[in-house]
Image: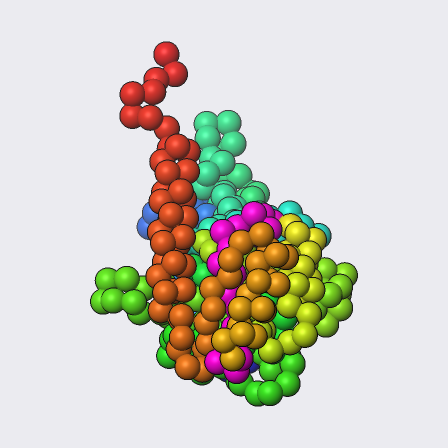
Amino acid sequence: MKFLDQCKIFIRSGNGGGGAVSFRREKYIEYGGPDGGDGGSGGDVWIEAVEGLNTLIDYRYQQHFKAETGVHGMGRNRHGAAGADMVLKVPVGTQVLEEDKETLIVDLDHAGMRYLLAKGGNGGWGNDRFKGPINQAPKHANPGQPGEEKWIWLRLKLIADAGLVGLPNAGKSTFLAAVSAAKPKIADYPFTTLVPNLGIVDLTSEERFVIADIPGLIEGASEGAGLGTRFLGHVERAGVLIHLVDATQDDIAGAYRTIRGELEAYGEGLADRAEILALNKVDALDEELRQWKSDELEAAAGRKPRLISGVSGEGVQDLLRAAYVEIRRHRGEEAAAEADDEPSADWSPL
């Protein structure tokens, strides 16, 4: 399945059905009168976050989505049926933006969340609604109201508890494959990862979290170099960033500063997110070189890095445990923030 994380679509709610102009004419019935029914309301356009989806590819080849028009009213006071709604099903984590691609309409951050994007037009009244002692035979009815239409953007930001960041070929895909059942592409050249990958880490039967691997960043990514920072949005929601640095490269400090610079340039609070720094691929180094590389990275980062190897598994379990501690702390902060947003049960406007 191809990965697609943003697309532009057109939505239109249904028009309301028109009211009917009709008069009752039946044999042996002395008094007739208006009996035009109302038109049905047009269908709404809804968007819903569902589980089991991780891409917007369904909206790649179909960009126009329209709800049904309401049925017109008929004689004998028969009202028209309402038009069927259009429900757009998207992955959890999808954001809906206006056509300017900046104004956020809704963020579907949990499964089952629904939002009304466009309301259908109301059905028109039939002439039976207008009868009265003055106007006993109205010859007019209301047309149905038109629906709403607009272009919107869908942008997917994957829901992950931890995010892997680093330069291309830092060993992120190997690390993801080692700690989860994910099977990302692994090769001995840069940019083997072209789209984000998700994996589930099972520490115990009750301790698990989702980890995301995004394509590697290079210097100038915030200005569009390489794959740019397009995929950094997929780790915006992460509670912790796992920063992998390739121990086999020459400039350890430069690699660290490059990634930190791109995180700060991207914004959205990523530079302030909890970070676990790890020196990867240490299985390829002897003890003396390990210590020298670790000291160099510690001098650049201001803290001691963890020594790990995605291939041999050295230090991986301890790193995952440390990441889970940060994730639990992040989840606790989010729960506290949501509790603060809810009004107190004792609050009264009087």
Q: Is residue 254 magenta?
A: no
179 relative to 168 in the view: left or right = left
Give the magenta part as a residue range. Answer: 268-285
Residue 177 percent across, percent down from the top left: 43, 79
Tell me how the rendering is colored: rainbow
**Camera-nearest residue between 90 and 38:** 90
What's the residue at 61%, 63% (across, down)?
A: 296
4 relative to 83 in the view: left or right = right
Q: Is 183 drawn above or below residue 39 in the view shown?
A: below
Judged from this view, the residue extending furthest toward the left is 205
Residue 171 percent across, percent down from the top left: 54, 77
**Camera-nearest residue between 206 and 99:** 206
The image shows a total of numbered marks equal to: 0
Q: Is residue 318 visible?
A: yes
What's the residue at 69%, 64% (across, down)?
A: 254
Residue 111 percent across, percent down from the top left: 38, 58
Judged from this view, the residue extending furthest toward the front is 288
Image quadrant of residue 14?
bottom right
**Camera-nearest residue between 336 and 53:** 336
Q: Is residue 242 visible?
A: no
Judged from this view, the residue extending furthest toward the bottom is 187
What's the residue at 57%, 87% (across, down)?
A: 187
246 relative to 73 in the view: left or right = right
Residue 76 percent across, percent down from the top left: 39, 52
Q: Is residue 278 magenta?
A: yes
Q: Quadrant of the C terminus?
A: top left
What's the residue at 46%, 30% (across, down)?
A: 132
Image quadrant of residue 258?
bottom right
